[in-house]
Amino acid sequence: MSKATPIDIINARVPGYKDLQMLFVREGIIERILPMTTVFKRVAPQEVELLDLRGDWVSLGGVDLQINGALGLAFPELKAENLDFLQKICEYLWDVGVDGFLPTLVTTSVDNIQRSLAVCADFISHQKVGSQILGVHLEGPFLNYQKRGAHPAEYLLPLTIEQVKRVLGDYTQIVKVITLAPELDPTGEVIPYLRSKGIIVSLGHSQATALQAEDAFKLGATMVTHAFNAMPLLHHREPGLLGAAILNPDVMCGFIADGEHVSPIMLQILLRASSQKGLFLVSDALSPLGLADGVYPWDTRQIEVKNGTARLPDGTLSGTTLPLLVGVQNLVKWGCDVETAIILATEAPRKAMPSTATLRNALTGISPNQPANLLRWHFDETTKQLTWQRLPLRLSDFA
């Protein structure tokens, strides 16, 4: 939104609000939100432009807490000379509707992790326009060998405080999430240590039983990485890590909605079982995000991308190349209501990371006194398709 042009957005559906709303945008900030029923007779001043959404939804942009790369660059391979290209990725992610993200470093050598963290720290200190880097997500190297998936076994490390300190080095402040297998630490010391450093602990790539997961949650773990994937099955006699997470109101589960990592039917079951309040959408996108299907290098190996799904030569599922908001569109296509689908990619990830100041004062939804970086969503009742676009800098930009 232009800071020079006051805009009143009318007839907008806003997640979390009943009925149609009116948003008063001044100097690029949402000044007020009022129900249309209280302002329907209001005449806007001549200097205020009016944008009628005609019942379309308006939301914050997406936040992606698990994304491994884009435009051909994998985040674990970041080097100092990639700073300009990292800015290009931020601009690309903004264009596909993502306001902020956590570059995710999958299991690799400690040297690679340290180098990538150094680049991210440098970039964060002076980042410009585009999607904002909110910190870093370390997905490994403290993972269970049996559930490592596409993570290279040679770089897995034992889960001890000493090894954690070695991996974090001087970059503890920018690491916001660590995915780990809690059963690897029988002492129970690591999770409290990470929480004391302000790092969110996410359980994943794990063989943890429900009891072990419950113990980890009591120690301070509050998140689960890509629900269903790289963890025990949700079994009727041993509900496992995921079963324990669904029942815990303080735990949020990330999930991938590409139709390959998890069956659409199973996602509907998850949405019903969790009442949708403990879930958030991630892309888990790999470096070919934004590129065409094909064969691409991935660390020392190769991945083949077909229809947005990436696999190793042996068929192991390794990620997607679909933007975050495609997951929202998929959810609606599979029967999820529009409001819930939007929330899962926009408000829910913010709720999962409430301590991150760069998430606009930790706001979890559209509220007064926050920047008006907004998306407009239109659901076509005839085609049952959901589309979106960023609200314009000027009304003349709006098609």
Image (spheres, rainbow, N blue to C red):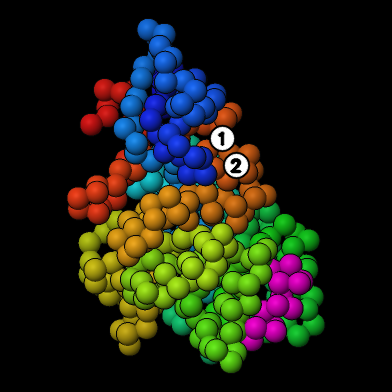
Q: Secondary structure at mark 2?
A: loop
Q: Nearer the viewer, residue 241 or 314?
A: 241
Find out whether residue 169 is within the magenta segment: no
Left or right: residue 327 compared with residue 233: left
Q: Tell me the kind of residue under disc 2.
A: Leu
Residue depicted at 74% across the width and 67% down the height = 220
Q: Nearer the viewer, residue 102 or 79?
A: 102
Q: Tell me the kind of residue under disc 1.
A: Ser
Left or right: residue 167 compared with residue 2: right
Is any atom of residue 291 visible in this view?
yes
| Residue 46 horizontal/vertical position (percent) | 37, 7
Quadrant location of the C terminus? top left
The secondary structure that most of the magenta stretch takes on is: helix
Residue annotated with mark 2? 363
| Residue 185 horizontal/vertical position (percent) | 72, 82
Residue annotated with mark 1? 367
| Residue 178 horizontal/vertical position (percent) | 62, 67
Q: Secondary structure at mark 1?
A: loop
Q: Nearer the viewer, residue 112 or 9?
A: 9
Distance from Cα at disc 1 to Cα at disc 2? 7 Å
Q: Which residues are magenta?
A: 208-221
Residue depicted at 63% across the width and 39% down the height = 361
